[in-house]
Structure formats: structure tokens, C-alpha cells
């Protein structure tokens, strides 16, 4: 369904996404994981043709065999909402404050599916019910500012699902939800992907939360993919990159004593404008050596699992 090959995005002279490649099949859920600033959202915007003005894109993005790079606005308009949709990270800015919620959820169905206004509104109410909003009729008649952050997030999900897209990109779709709601929303999205054959790209900084719903995980650091593999393998002790291992070690877990601190990665992610080659993670890595100043190779552990690290074997032994 989706093939991304050597994606590179440059903005204001700095390469922010550096050679990212992945595929996504119909009915599959891929988790794109990384800290803030790793390039996850910029990657999502590239897949939607919504990069900021002045951004330079190279590489290939193919959707059902069609190359999306260089696509004209009219062609993008036919794809967005109908075939490719996105749940944006900040629901308040994604919704129009001047229009009622029901009208905004109904709009894609009117534009792409030629529904009449009354029919589209009724379908919008059912969509709001489907994403777990109580009293969906009242929600449909409300303006965005009259809803809580969690309600607005669910409205954004309903808008994205309105036309039954073949590819759904969900950028931090559970940000405004509490812990119990987060699991429900992600489970709903993953179930829909499997049932309807929809490809789902789940983007998050929370590896543990997304891994429960994704078949595969792609971990990004400093604009680059550093590890990709089956979610079960990475969570089950098979993570082969020190960064992935650090993210897993830092997740909250049952059994940690009161007052006990979780392991944390030292330092901070590098400024991309200051990178001069080599492994971007080396300054924070417990296994770093002089050789890591050179660009690390991609080491294939098996056909479905790779790690961009010079010291894969040591990382696996010590994990």
C-alpha cells in the first residue's frame, strides 16, 4: 500500500529527515516511535503533501504504486480525506472554531462521497458515536471550544475516518486522552485497520503504548531510522539498538518501588544543524567507541528486523 524510500526533508538549510525508508501493507499497523524532534511529524506531513513552505523533499513516496512526490494540489485534494487521512496531534488547531463539529465531520462525506447535507450529518453523528463520544447528537451541534481536549481529539479521529480511508496516519492520536481512553482509542484504530484492510501509521513517543497495537515498530532518532522490527520481538528482549533499549528501560512498569527512579537516557538529542556524520546517538550511548564517529551500517538480524548500529552484537549481549 505505502512504500517510502530514502525520504529526505530539508528545511532552512538543515536536513531534518535523513534517508528514511519503510513499507506499510493493507491491514497492517506500523508504529513510528521517537522523541520530540526526531522527525516523526515532518514525515507524516510529507505523506499528506502538507510540508511547510520552503521545505525540500527528495526520495520516493509511493501510495498504491503512485508516486506522490511532486503531485499537484488538485491531485492531492482528491487523495486527502478520501484515500489518505490524518489525525493531527493538536485537535484544537485541527478544527475550525467557526463551524459546528457535526458539519466538520460531515464535510468529507459531502465532498468526496456526494452525500446530501442531512444524510451526511446523520452519518457524522454515527461516527461520533463510533469513536466513543456520549450524546453524539449534542456533540455534533457543539463548537470546538465547547468540548474538552479529549472530546476534540475524538472528533478529529471521526473526521479522519469519515470516508473510510485506505491509509490513516495518526500523529499522537491519544495525546489529550487519559490512560484508559488512550488504550481504547488505539485499540479501536488498530481493529479498524485489521477489519477493513486499512493501513495504519501510528506515530508516538510512547513506545510501550503503541507497541501493544502495532505489528511492527520503526524507531527514529535525529531524523533517521535506527531500528525496525516486529513489535513482539522488540518488546520481548530482542531490541538491538541502544536507543531502543533505553526507551524500553525508561517505561513505567509494575513492581517498581516507591521513590525508585526509572533508568533515563543521559544527555539530550543533538541539534540536527550541528551533525557532522557518524552515529547521531553516540554521545548518549553506553557502548560508543571511536569507530562510531563514522556512519553506522544497517545490520540485518533477520529479514524483518534491522538495526543501524556498529555494535549490535554487544548491545544484544548486554540487554
Image (cartoon, rainbow, N blue to C red):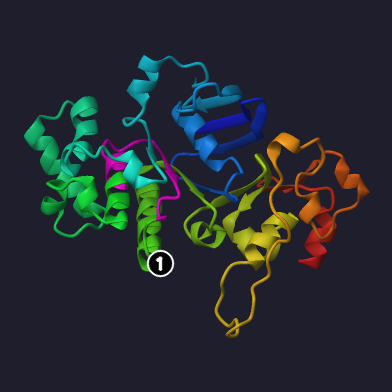
- Above or below, comparing residue 253 to residue 32 in the picture: below
Q: Residue at x 53, y 36 (%)?
A: 42
Percent of width and height locating residue 130:
23, 53
Q: Residue at x 67, y 30 (%)?
A: 15
- Above or below, comparing residue 71 to residue 36 in the picture: above
- Tally of marks: 1
Quadrant into which the C terminus falls: bottom right
Instruction: Between residue 103 and residue 144, name the one nearer to us.
Output: 144
Q: Is residue 240 visible?
A: no
Percent of width and height locating residue 300:
75, 46
Reply yes or no: does residue 121 show up in magenta. Answer: no
> Of helix, strand and loop, which one carries label 1?
helix
Q: Is residue 271 left or right of residue 25?
A: right
Q: Is residue 247 left or right of residue 202?
A: right
Residue 132 location, quadrant:
bottom left
Q: Looking at this view, name the residue that lies furthest to the left.
A: 118
Q: Residue at x 53, y 52 (%)?
A: 215
Percent of width and height locating residue 231:
58, 56
Q: Residue at x 45, y 28 (%)?
A: 50
Q: Looking at this view, name the residue that lies furthest to the bottom.
A: 258
- Above or below, comparing residue 117 to residue 127 in the picture: above
Instruction: Between residue 305 and residue 256, name the one nearer to us.
Output: 256
Q: Is residue 248 visible?
A: yes
Query: What is the span of residues highlighted in magenta in the rendered image?
Result: 157-175
- Alpha-carbon neighbours of circle 1 within 10 Å: few (<14), some, or many (≥20)? few
Q: Which residue is mark 1?
A: 179
Q: Is residue 153 left or right of residue 267?
A: left
Residue 99 location, quadrant:
top left
Reply yes or no: does residue 164 show up in magenta. Answer: yes
Amino acid at each position: 500500500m505505502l512504500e517510502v524510500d530514502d525520504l529526505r526533508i530539508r528545511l532552512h538549510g538543515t536536513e531534518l529527515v535523513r534517508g528514511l525508508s519503510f513499507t506499510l501493507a493493507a491491514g497492517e499497523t506500523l508504529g513510528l516511535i521517537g522523541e520530540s524532534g526526531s522527525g516523526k511529524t515532518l514525515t507524516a506531513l510529507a505523506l499528506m503533501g502538507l510540508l511547510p513552505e520552503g521545505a525540500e523533499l527528495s526520495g520516493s513516496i509511493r501510495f498504491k504504486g503512485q508516486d506522490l512526490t511532486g503531485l499537484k494540489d488538485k491531485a492531492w485534494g482528491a487523495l486527502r480525506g478520501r484515500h489518505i487521512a490524518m489525525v493531527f496531534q493538536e485537535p484544537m488547531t485541527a478544527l475550525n472554531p467557526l463551524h459546528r463539529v457535526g458539519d466538520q465531520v460531515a464535510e468529507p462525506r459531502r465532498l468526496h462521497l456526494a452525500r446530501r447535507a442531512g444524510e451526511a450529518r446523520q452519518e457524522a453523528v454515527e461516527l461520533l458515536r463510533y469513536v466513543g463520544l456520549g450524546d453524539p447528537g449534542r456533540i455534533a451541534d457543539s463548537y470546538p471550544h465547547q468540548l474538552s481536549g479529549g472530546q476534540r481529539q475524538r472528533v478529529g479521529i471521526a473526521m479522519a475516518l469519515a470516508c473510510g480511508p485506505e491509509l490513516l496516519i495518526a500523529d499522537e492520536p491519544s495525546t489529550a486522552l487519559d490512560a484508559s481512553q488512550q488504550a481504547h482509542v488505539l485499540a479501536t484504530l488498530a481493529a479498524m485497520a485489521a477489519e477493513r484492510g486499512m493501513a495504519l501509521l501510528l506515530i508516538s513517543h510512547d513506545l510501550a503504548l503503541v507497541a501493544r497495537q502495532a505489528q511492527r515498530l520503526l524507531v527514529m532518532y535525529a531524523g533517521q531510522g535506527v531500528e525496525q522490527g516486529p513489535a513482539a520481538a522488540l518488546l520481548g528482549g530482542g531490541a538491538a539498538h541502544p536507543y531502543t533499549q533505553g526507551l524500553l528501560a525508561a517505561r513505567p512498569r509494575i513492581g517498581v518501588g516507591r521513590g525508585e527512579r526509572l533508568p533515563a537516557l543521559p544527555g539530550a538529542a543533538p541539534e540536527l544543524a550541528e551533525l557532522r556524520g557518524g552515529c547521531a546517538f553516540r554521545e548518549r550511548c553506553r557502548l560508543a567507541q571511536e569507530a562510531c564517529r563514522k556512519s553506522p551500517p544497517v545490520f540485518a538480524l533477520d529479514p524483518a528486523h534491522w538495526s543501524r548500529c556498529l555494535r549490535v552484537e554487544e548491545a544484544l549481549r548486554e540487554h
